[in-house]
Image (cartoon, grey):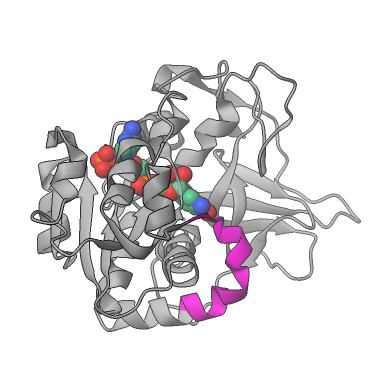
Amino acid sequence: NKYVTIKHHIHGLPSSLDFESRSATLTLMIPPGSEDVIVKNLFVSIDPYQINRMKVCSSSQKTVDFARRLHPGHRIDAFGAGRVVASGNAEFKKDELVVGVLGWEEYTVVRPGSMLRKIDSNMDFPLSYHLGILGPSGLTAYAGFYDVCKPKEGEKVFVSAACGSVGHLVGQFGKQSGCYVVGCAGSKKKVELLKEKLGFDDAFNYKEETDLKSALKRYRYFPDGIDIYFDNVGAEVQEAAVANMNAFGRVAVCGVISQYTDAGKQAAPNMLDIIYKRITIRGFLAYDHLSIYDDFVSATSDHIRHGRIQSLEDVSHGLESVPSAFAGLFRGDNVGKKLVQLAAD
Ligand code: NDP
């Protein structure tokens, strides 16, 4: 069973040279009495948070907030979708399609109690959707936007990393809710896509702005200020958004990717703005919103079927492409949900 692991703990920006492939023996058979399920991985998800598990850490910390730390040689668990090849668990049968916590590897042995779910065979969406728009990224966008930001029609919404997996969905949910939506992203191509394909009201390339605070100011993208900021990046973008927020504005802190590879990039929004404008800044994890999972899947499937929301996916092929796909997240290479397809079937 081939798998991808880190060669050493990572400091700063990751590169594909920080990773290597290894092999371990695996018999595709379940021993008598075991309730394990063996899954052949077809798609694996490539997510920025994994870097926080791979970093150099001076303490003897075993976990990174909610996930186990990774060490050289360890297999890397990750969300994925695949096909059951052997099962000792009555709930899962051979050949069924499943999604859950699998790994950056060809096959994963899923122990009882691990997160694994059968794909509803009545849903005729591509398998990859269950990792993106109808999976964790979609739930993150939906929960963060509706549960945390509580949007009202006509409100002004700003989203960063807007052409990424979570961001492009947040903006489209915003448009479905009758909001004015502006996104920022790191290239001209992404900016055009947001405006021309995904229906954002406006978009800009944050890398071209020398003064983000002024770029967001009233006479530019937000003439009437910002009511909601969905933060995927942190640092100066968050500071600029807070400086331009309206009274009772809400900031959903989904992720701070600029800080993941540079600890010096912590956002320091002006506290006086937060007090006088009564701004709420709230971090959240999609996991805490599983109670709305069924509503999310039903509403989002409906949007997809009626062509109201589009899914952007960026798929690389083969286990050997996992390291560069991952490193690419931190260079802004991906357009939409980054996935690696390991096998066709
Ligand atoms: P994306 O698909 O958005 O990929 C990451 C994108 O971030 C890149 O394409 C790049 O786009 C942008 N980026 C990379 N480095 C920087 C930087 N230094 N400064 C600004 N932008 C940068 O990833 P996801 O949609 O999967 O995740 C988005 C965020 O949400 C991440 O911070 C992630 O950790 C977080 N997250 C949080 C969850 C939760 O439960 N709270 C769940 C899932 C994700 P660009 O070209 O625009 O620079």
Is residue 263 found inside the magenta-colored segment of the image?
Answer: no
The picture quadrant for ligand 1 comes to: top left
**For this view, does 222 lie left or right of residue 96?**
left
Rendering coords of residue 42 (x, y %)? 49, 51
| Left or right: residue 292 compared with residue 14 | right
Question: Where does the N terminus fall, quadrant-wise?
Answer: top right
Tell me which residue sits at (15%, 43%) in the image. Answer: 214
Q: Residue at position x 33%, y 56% from top?
A: 167
| Above or below: residue 34 compared with residue 170 | above
Residue at (64% x, 29% y) in the render: 70
Q: Quadrant of residue 134?
A: bottom left
Residue 257 image point, x, y percent: 41, 38
Which portion, as a residue range, is magenta? 281-297
Which residue shows up at 37% across the image and 56% down it? 230
- Taking 137 as reference, is 91 above or below it? below
Is the magenta region chiefly helix, strand or loop? helix
* Left or right, 345 with reference to 78: left
Q: How many marks?
A: 0
In front here: 232 or 275? 275
For the residue pair 47 and 206, the one nearer the viewer reads as 206
In front here: 228 or 328? 228
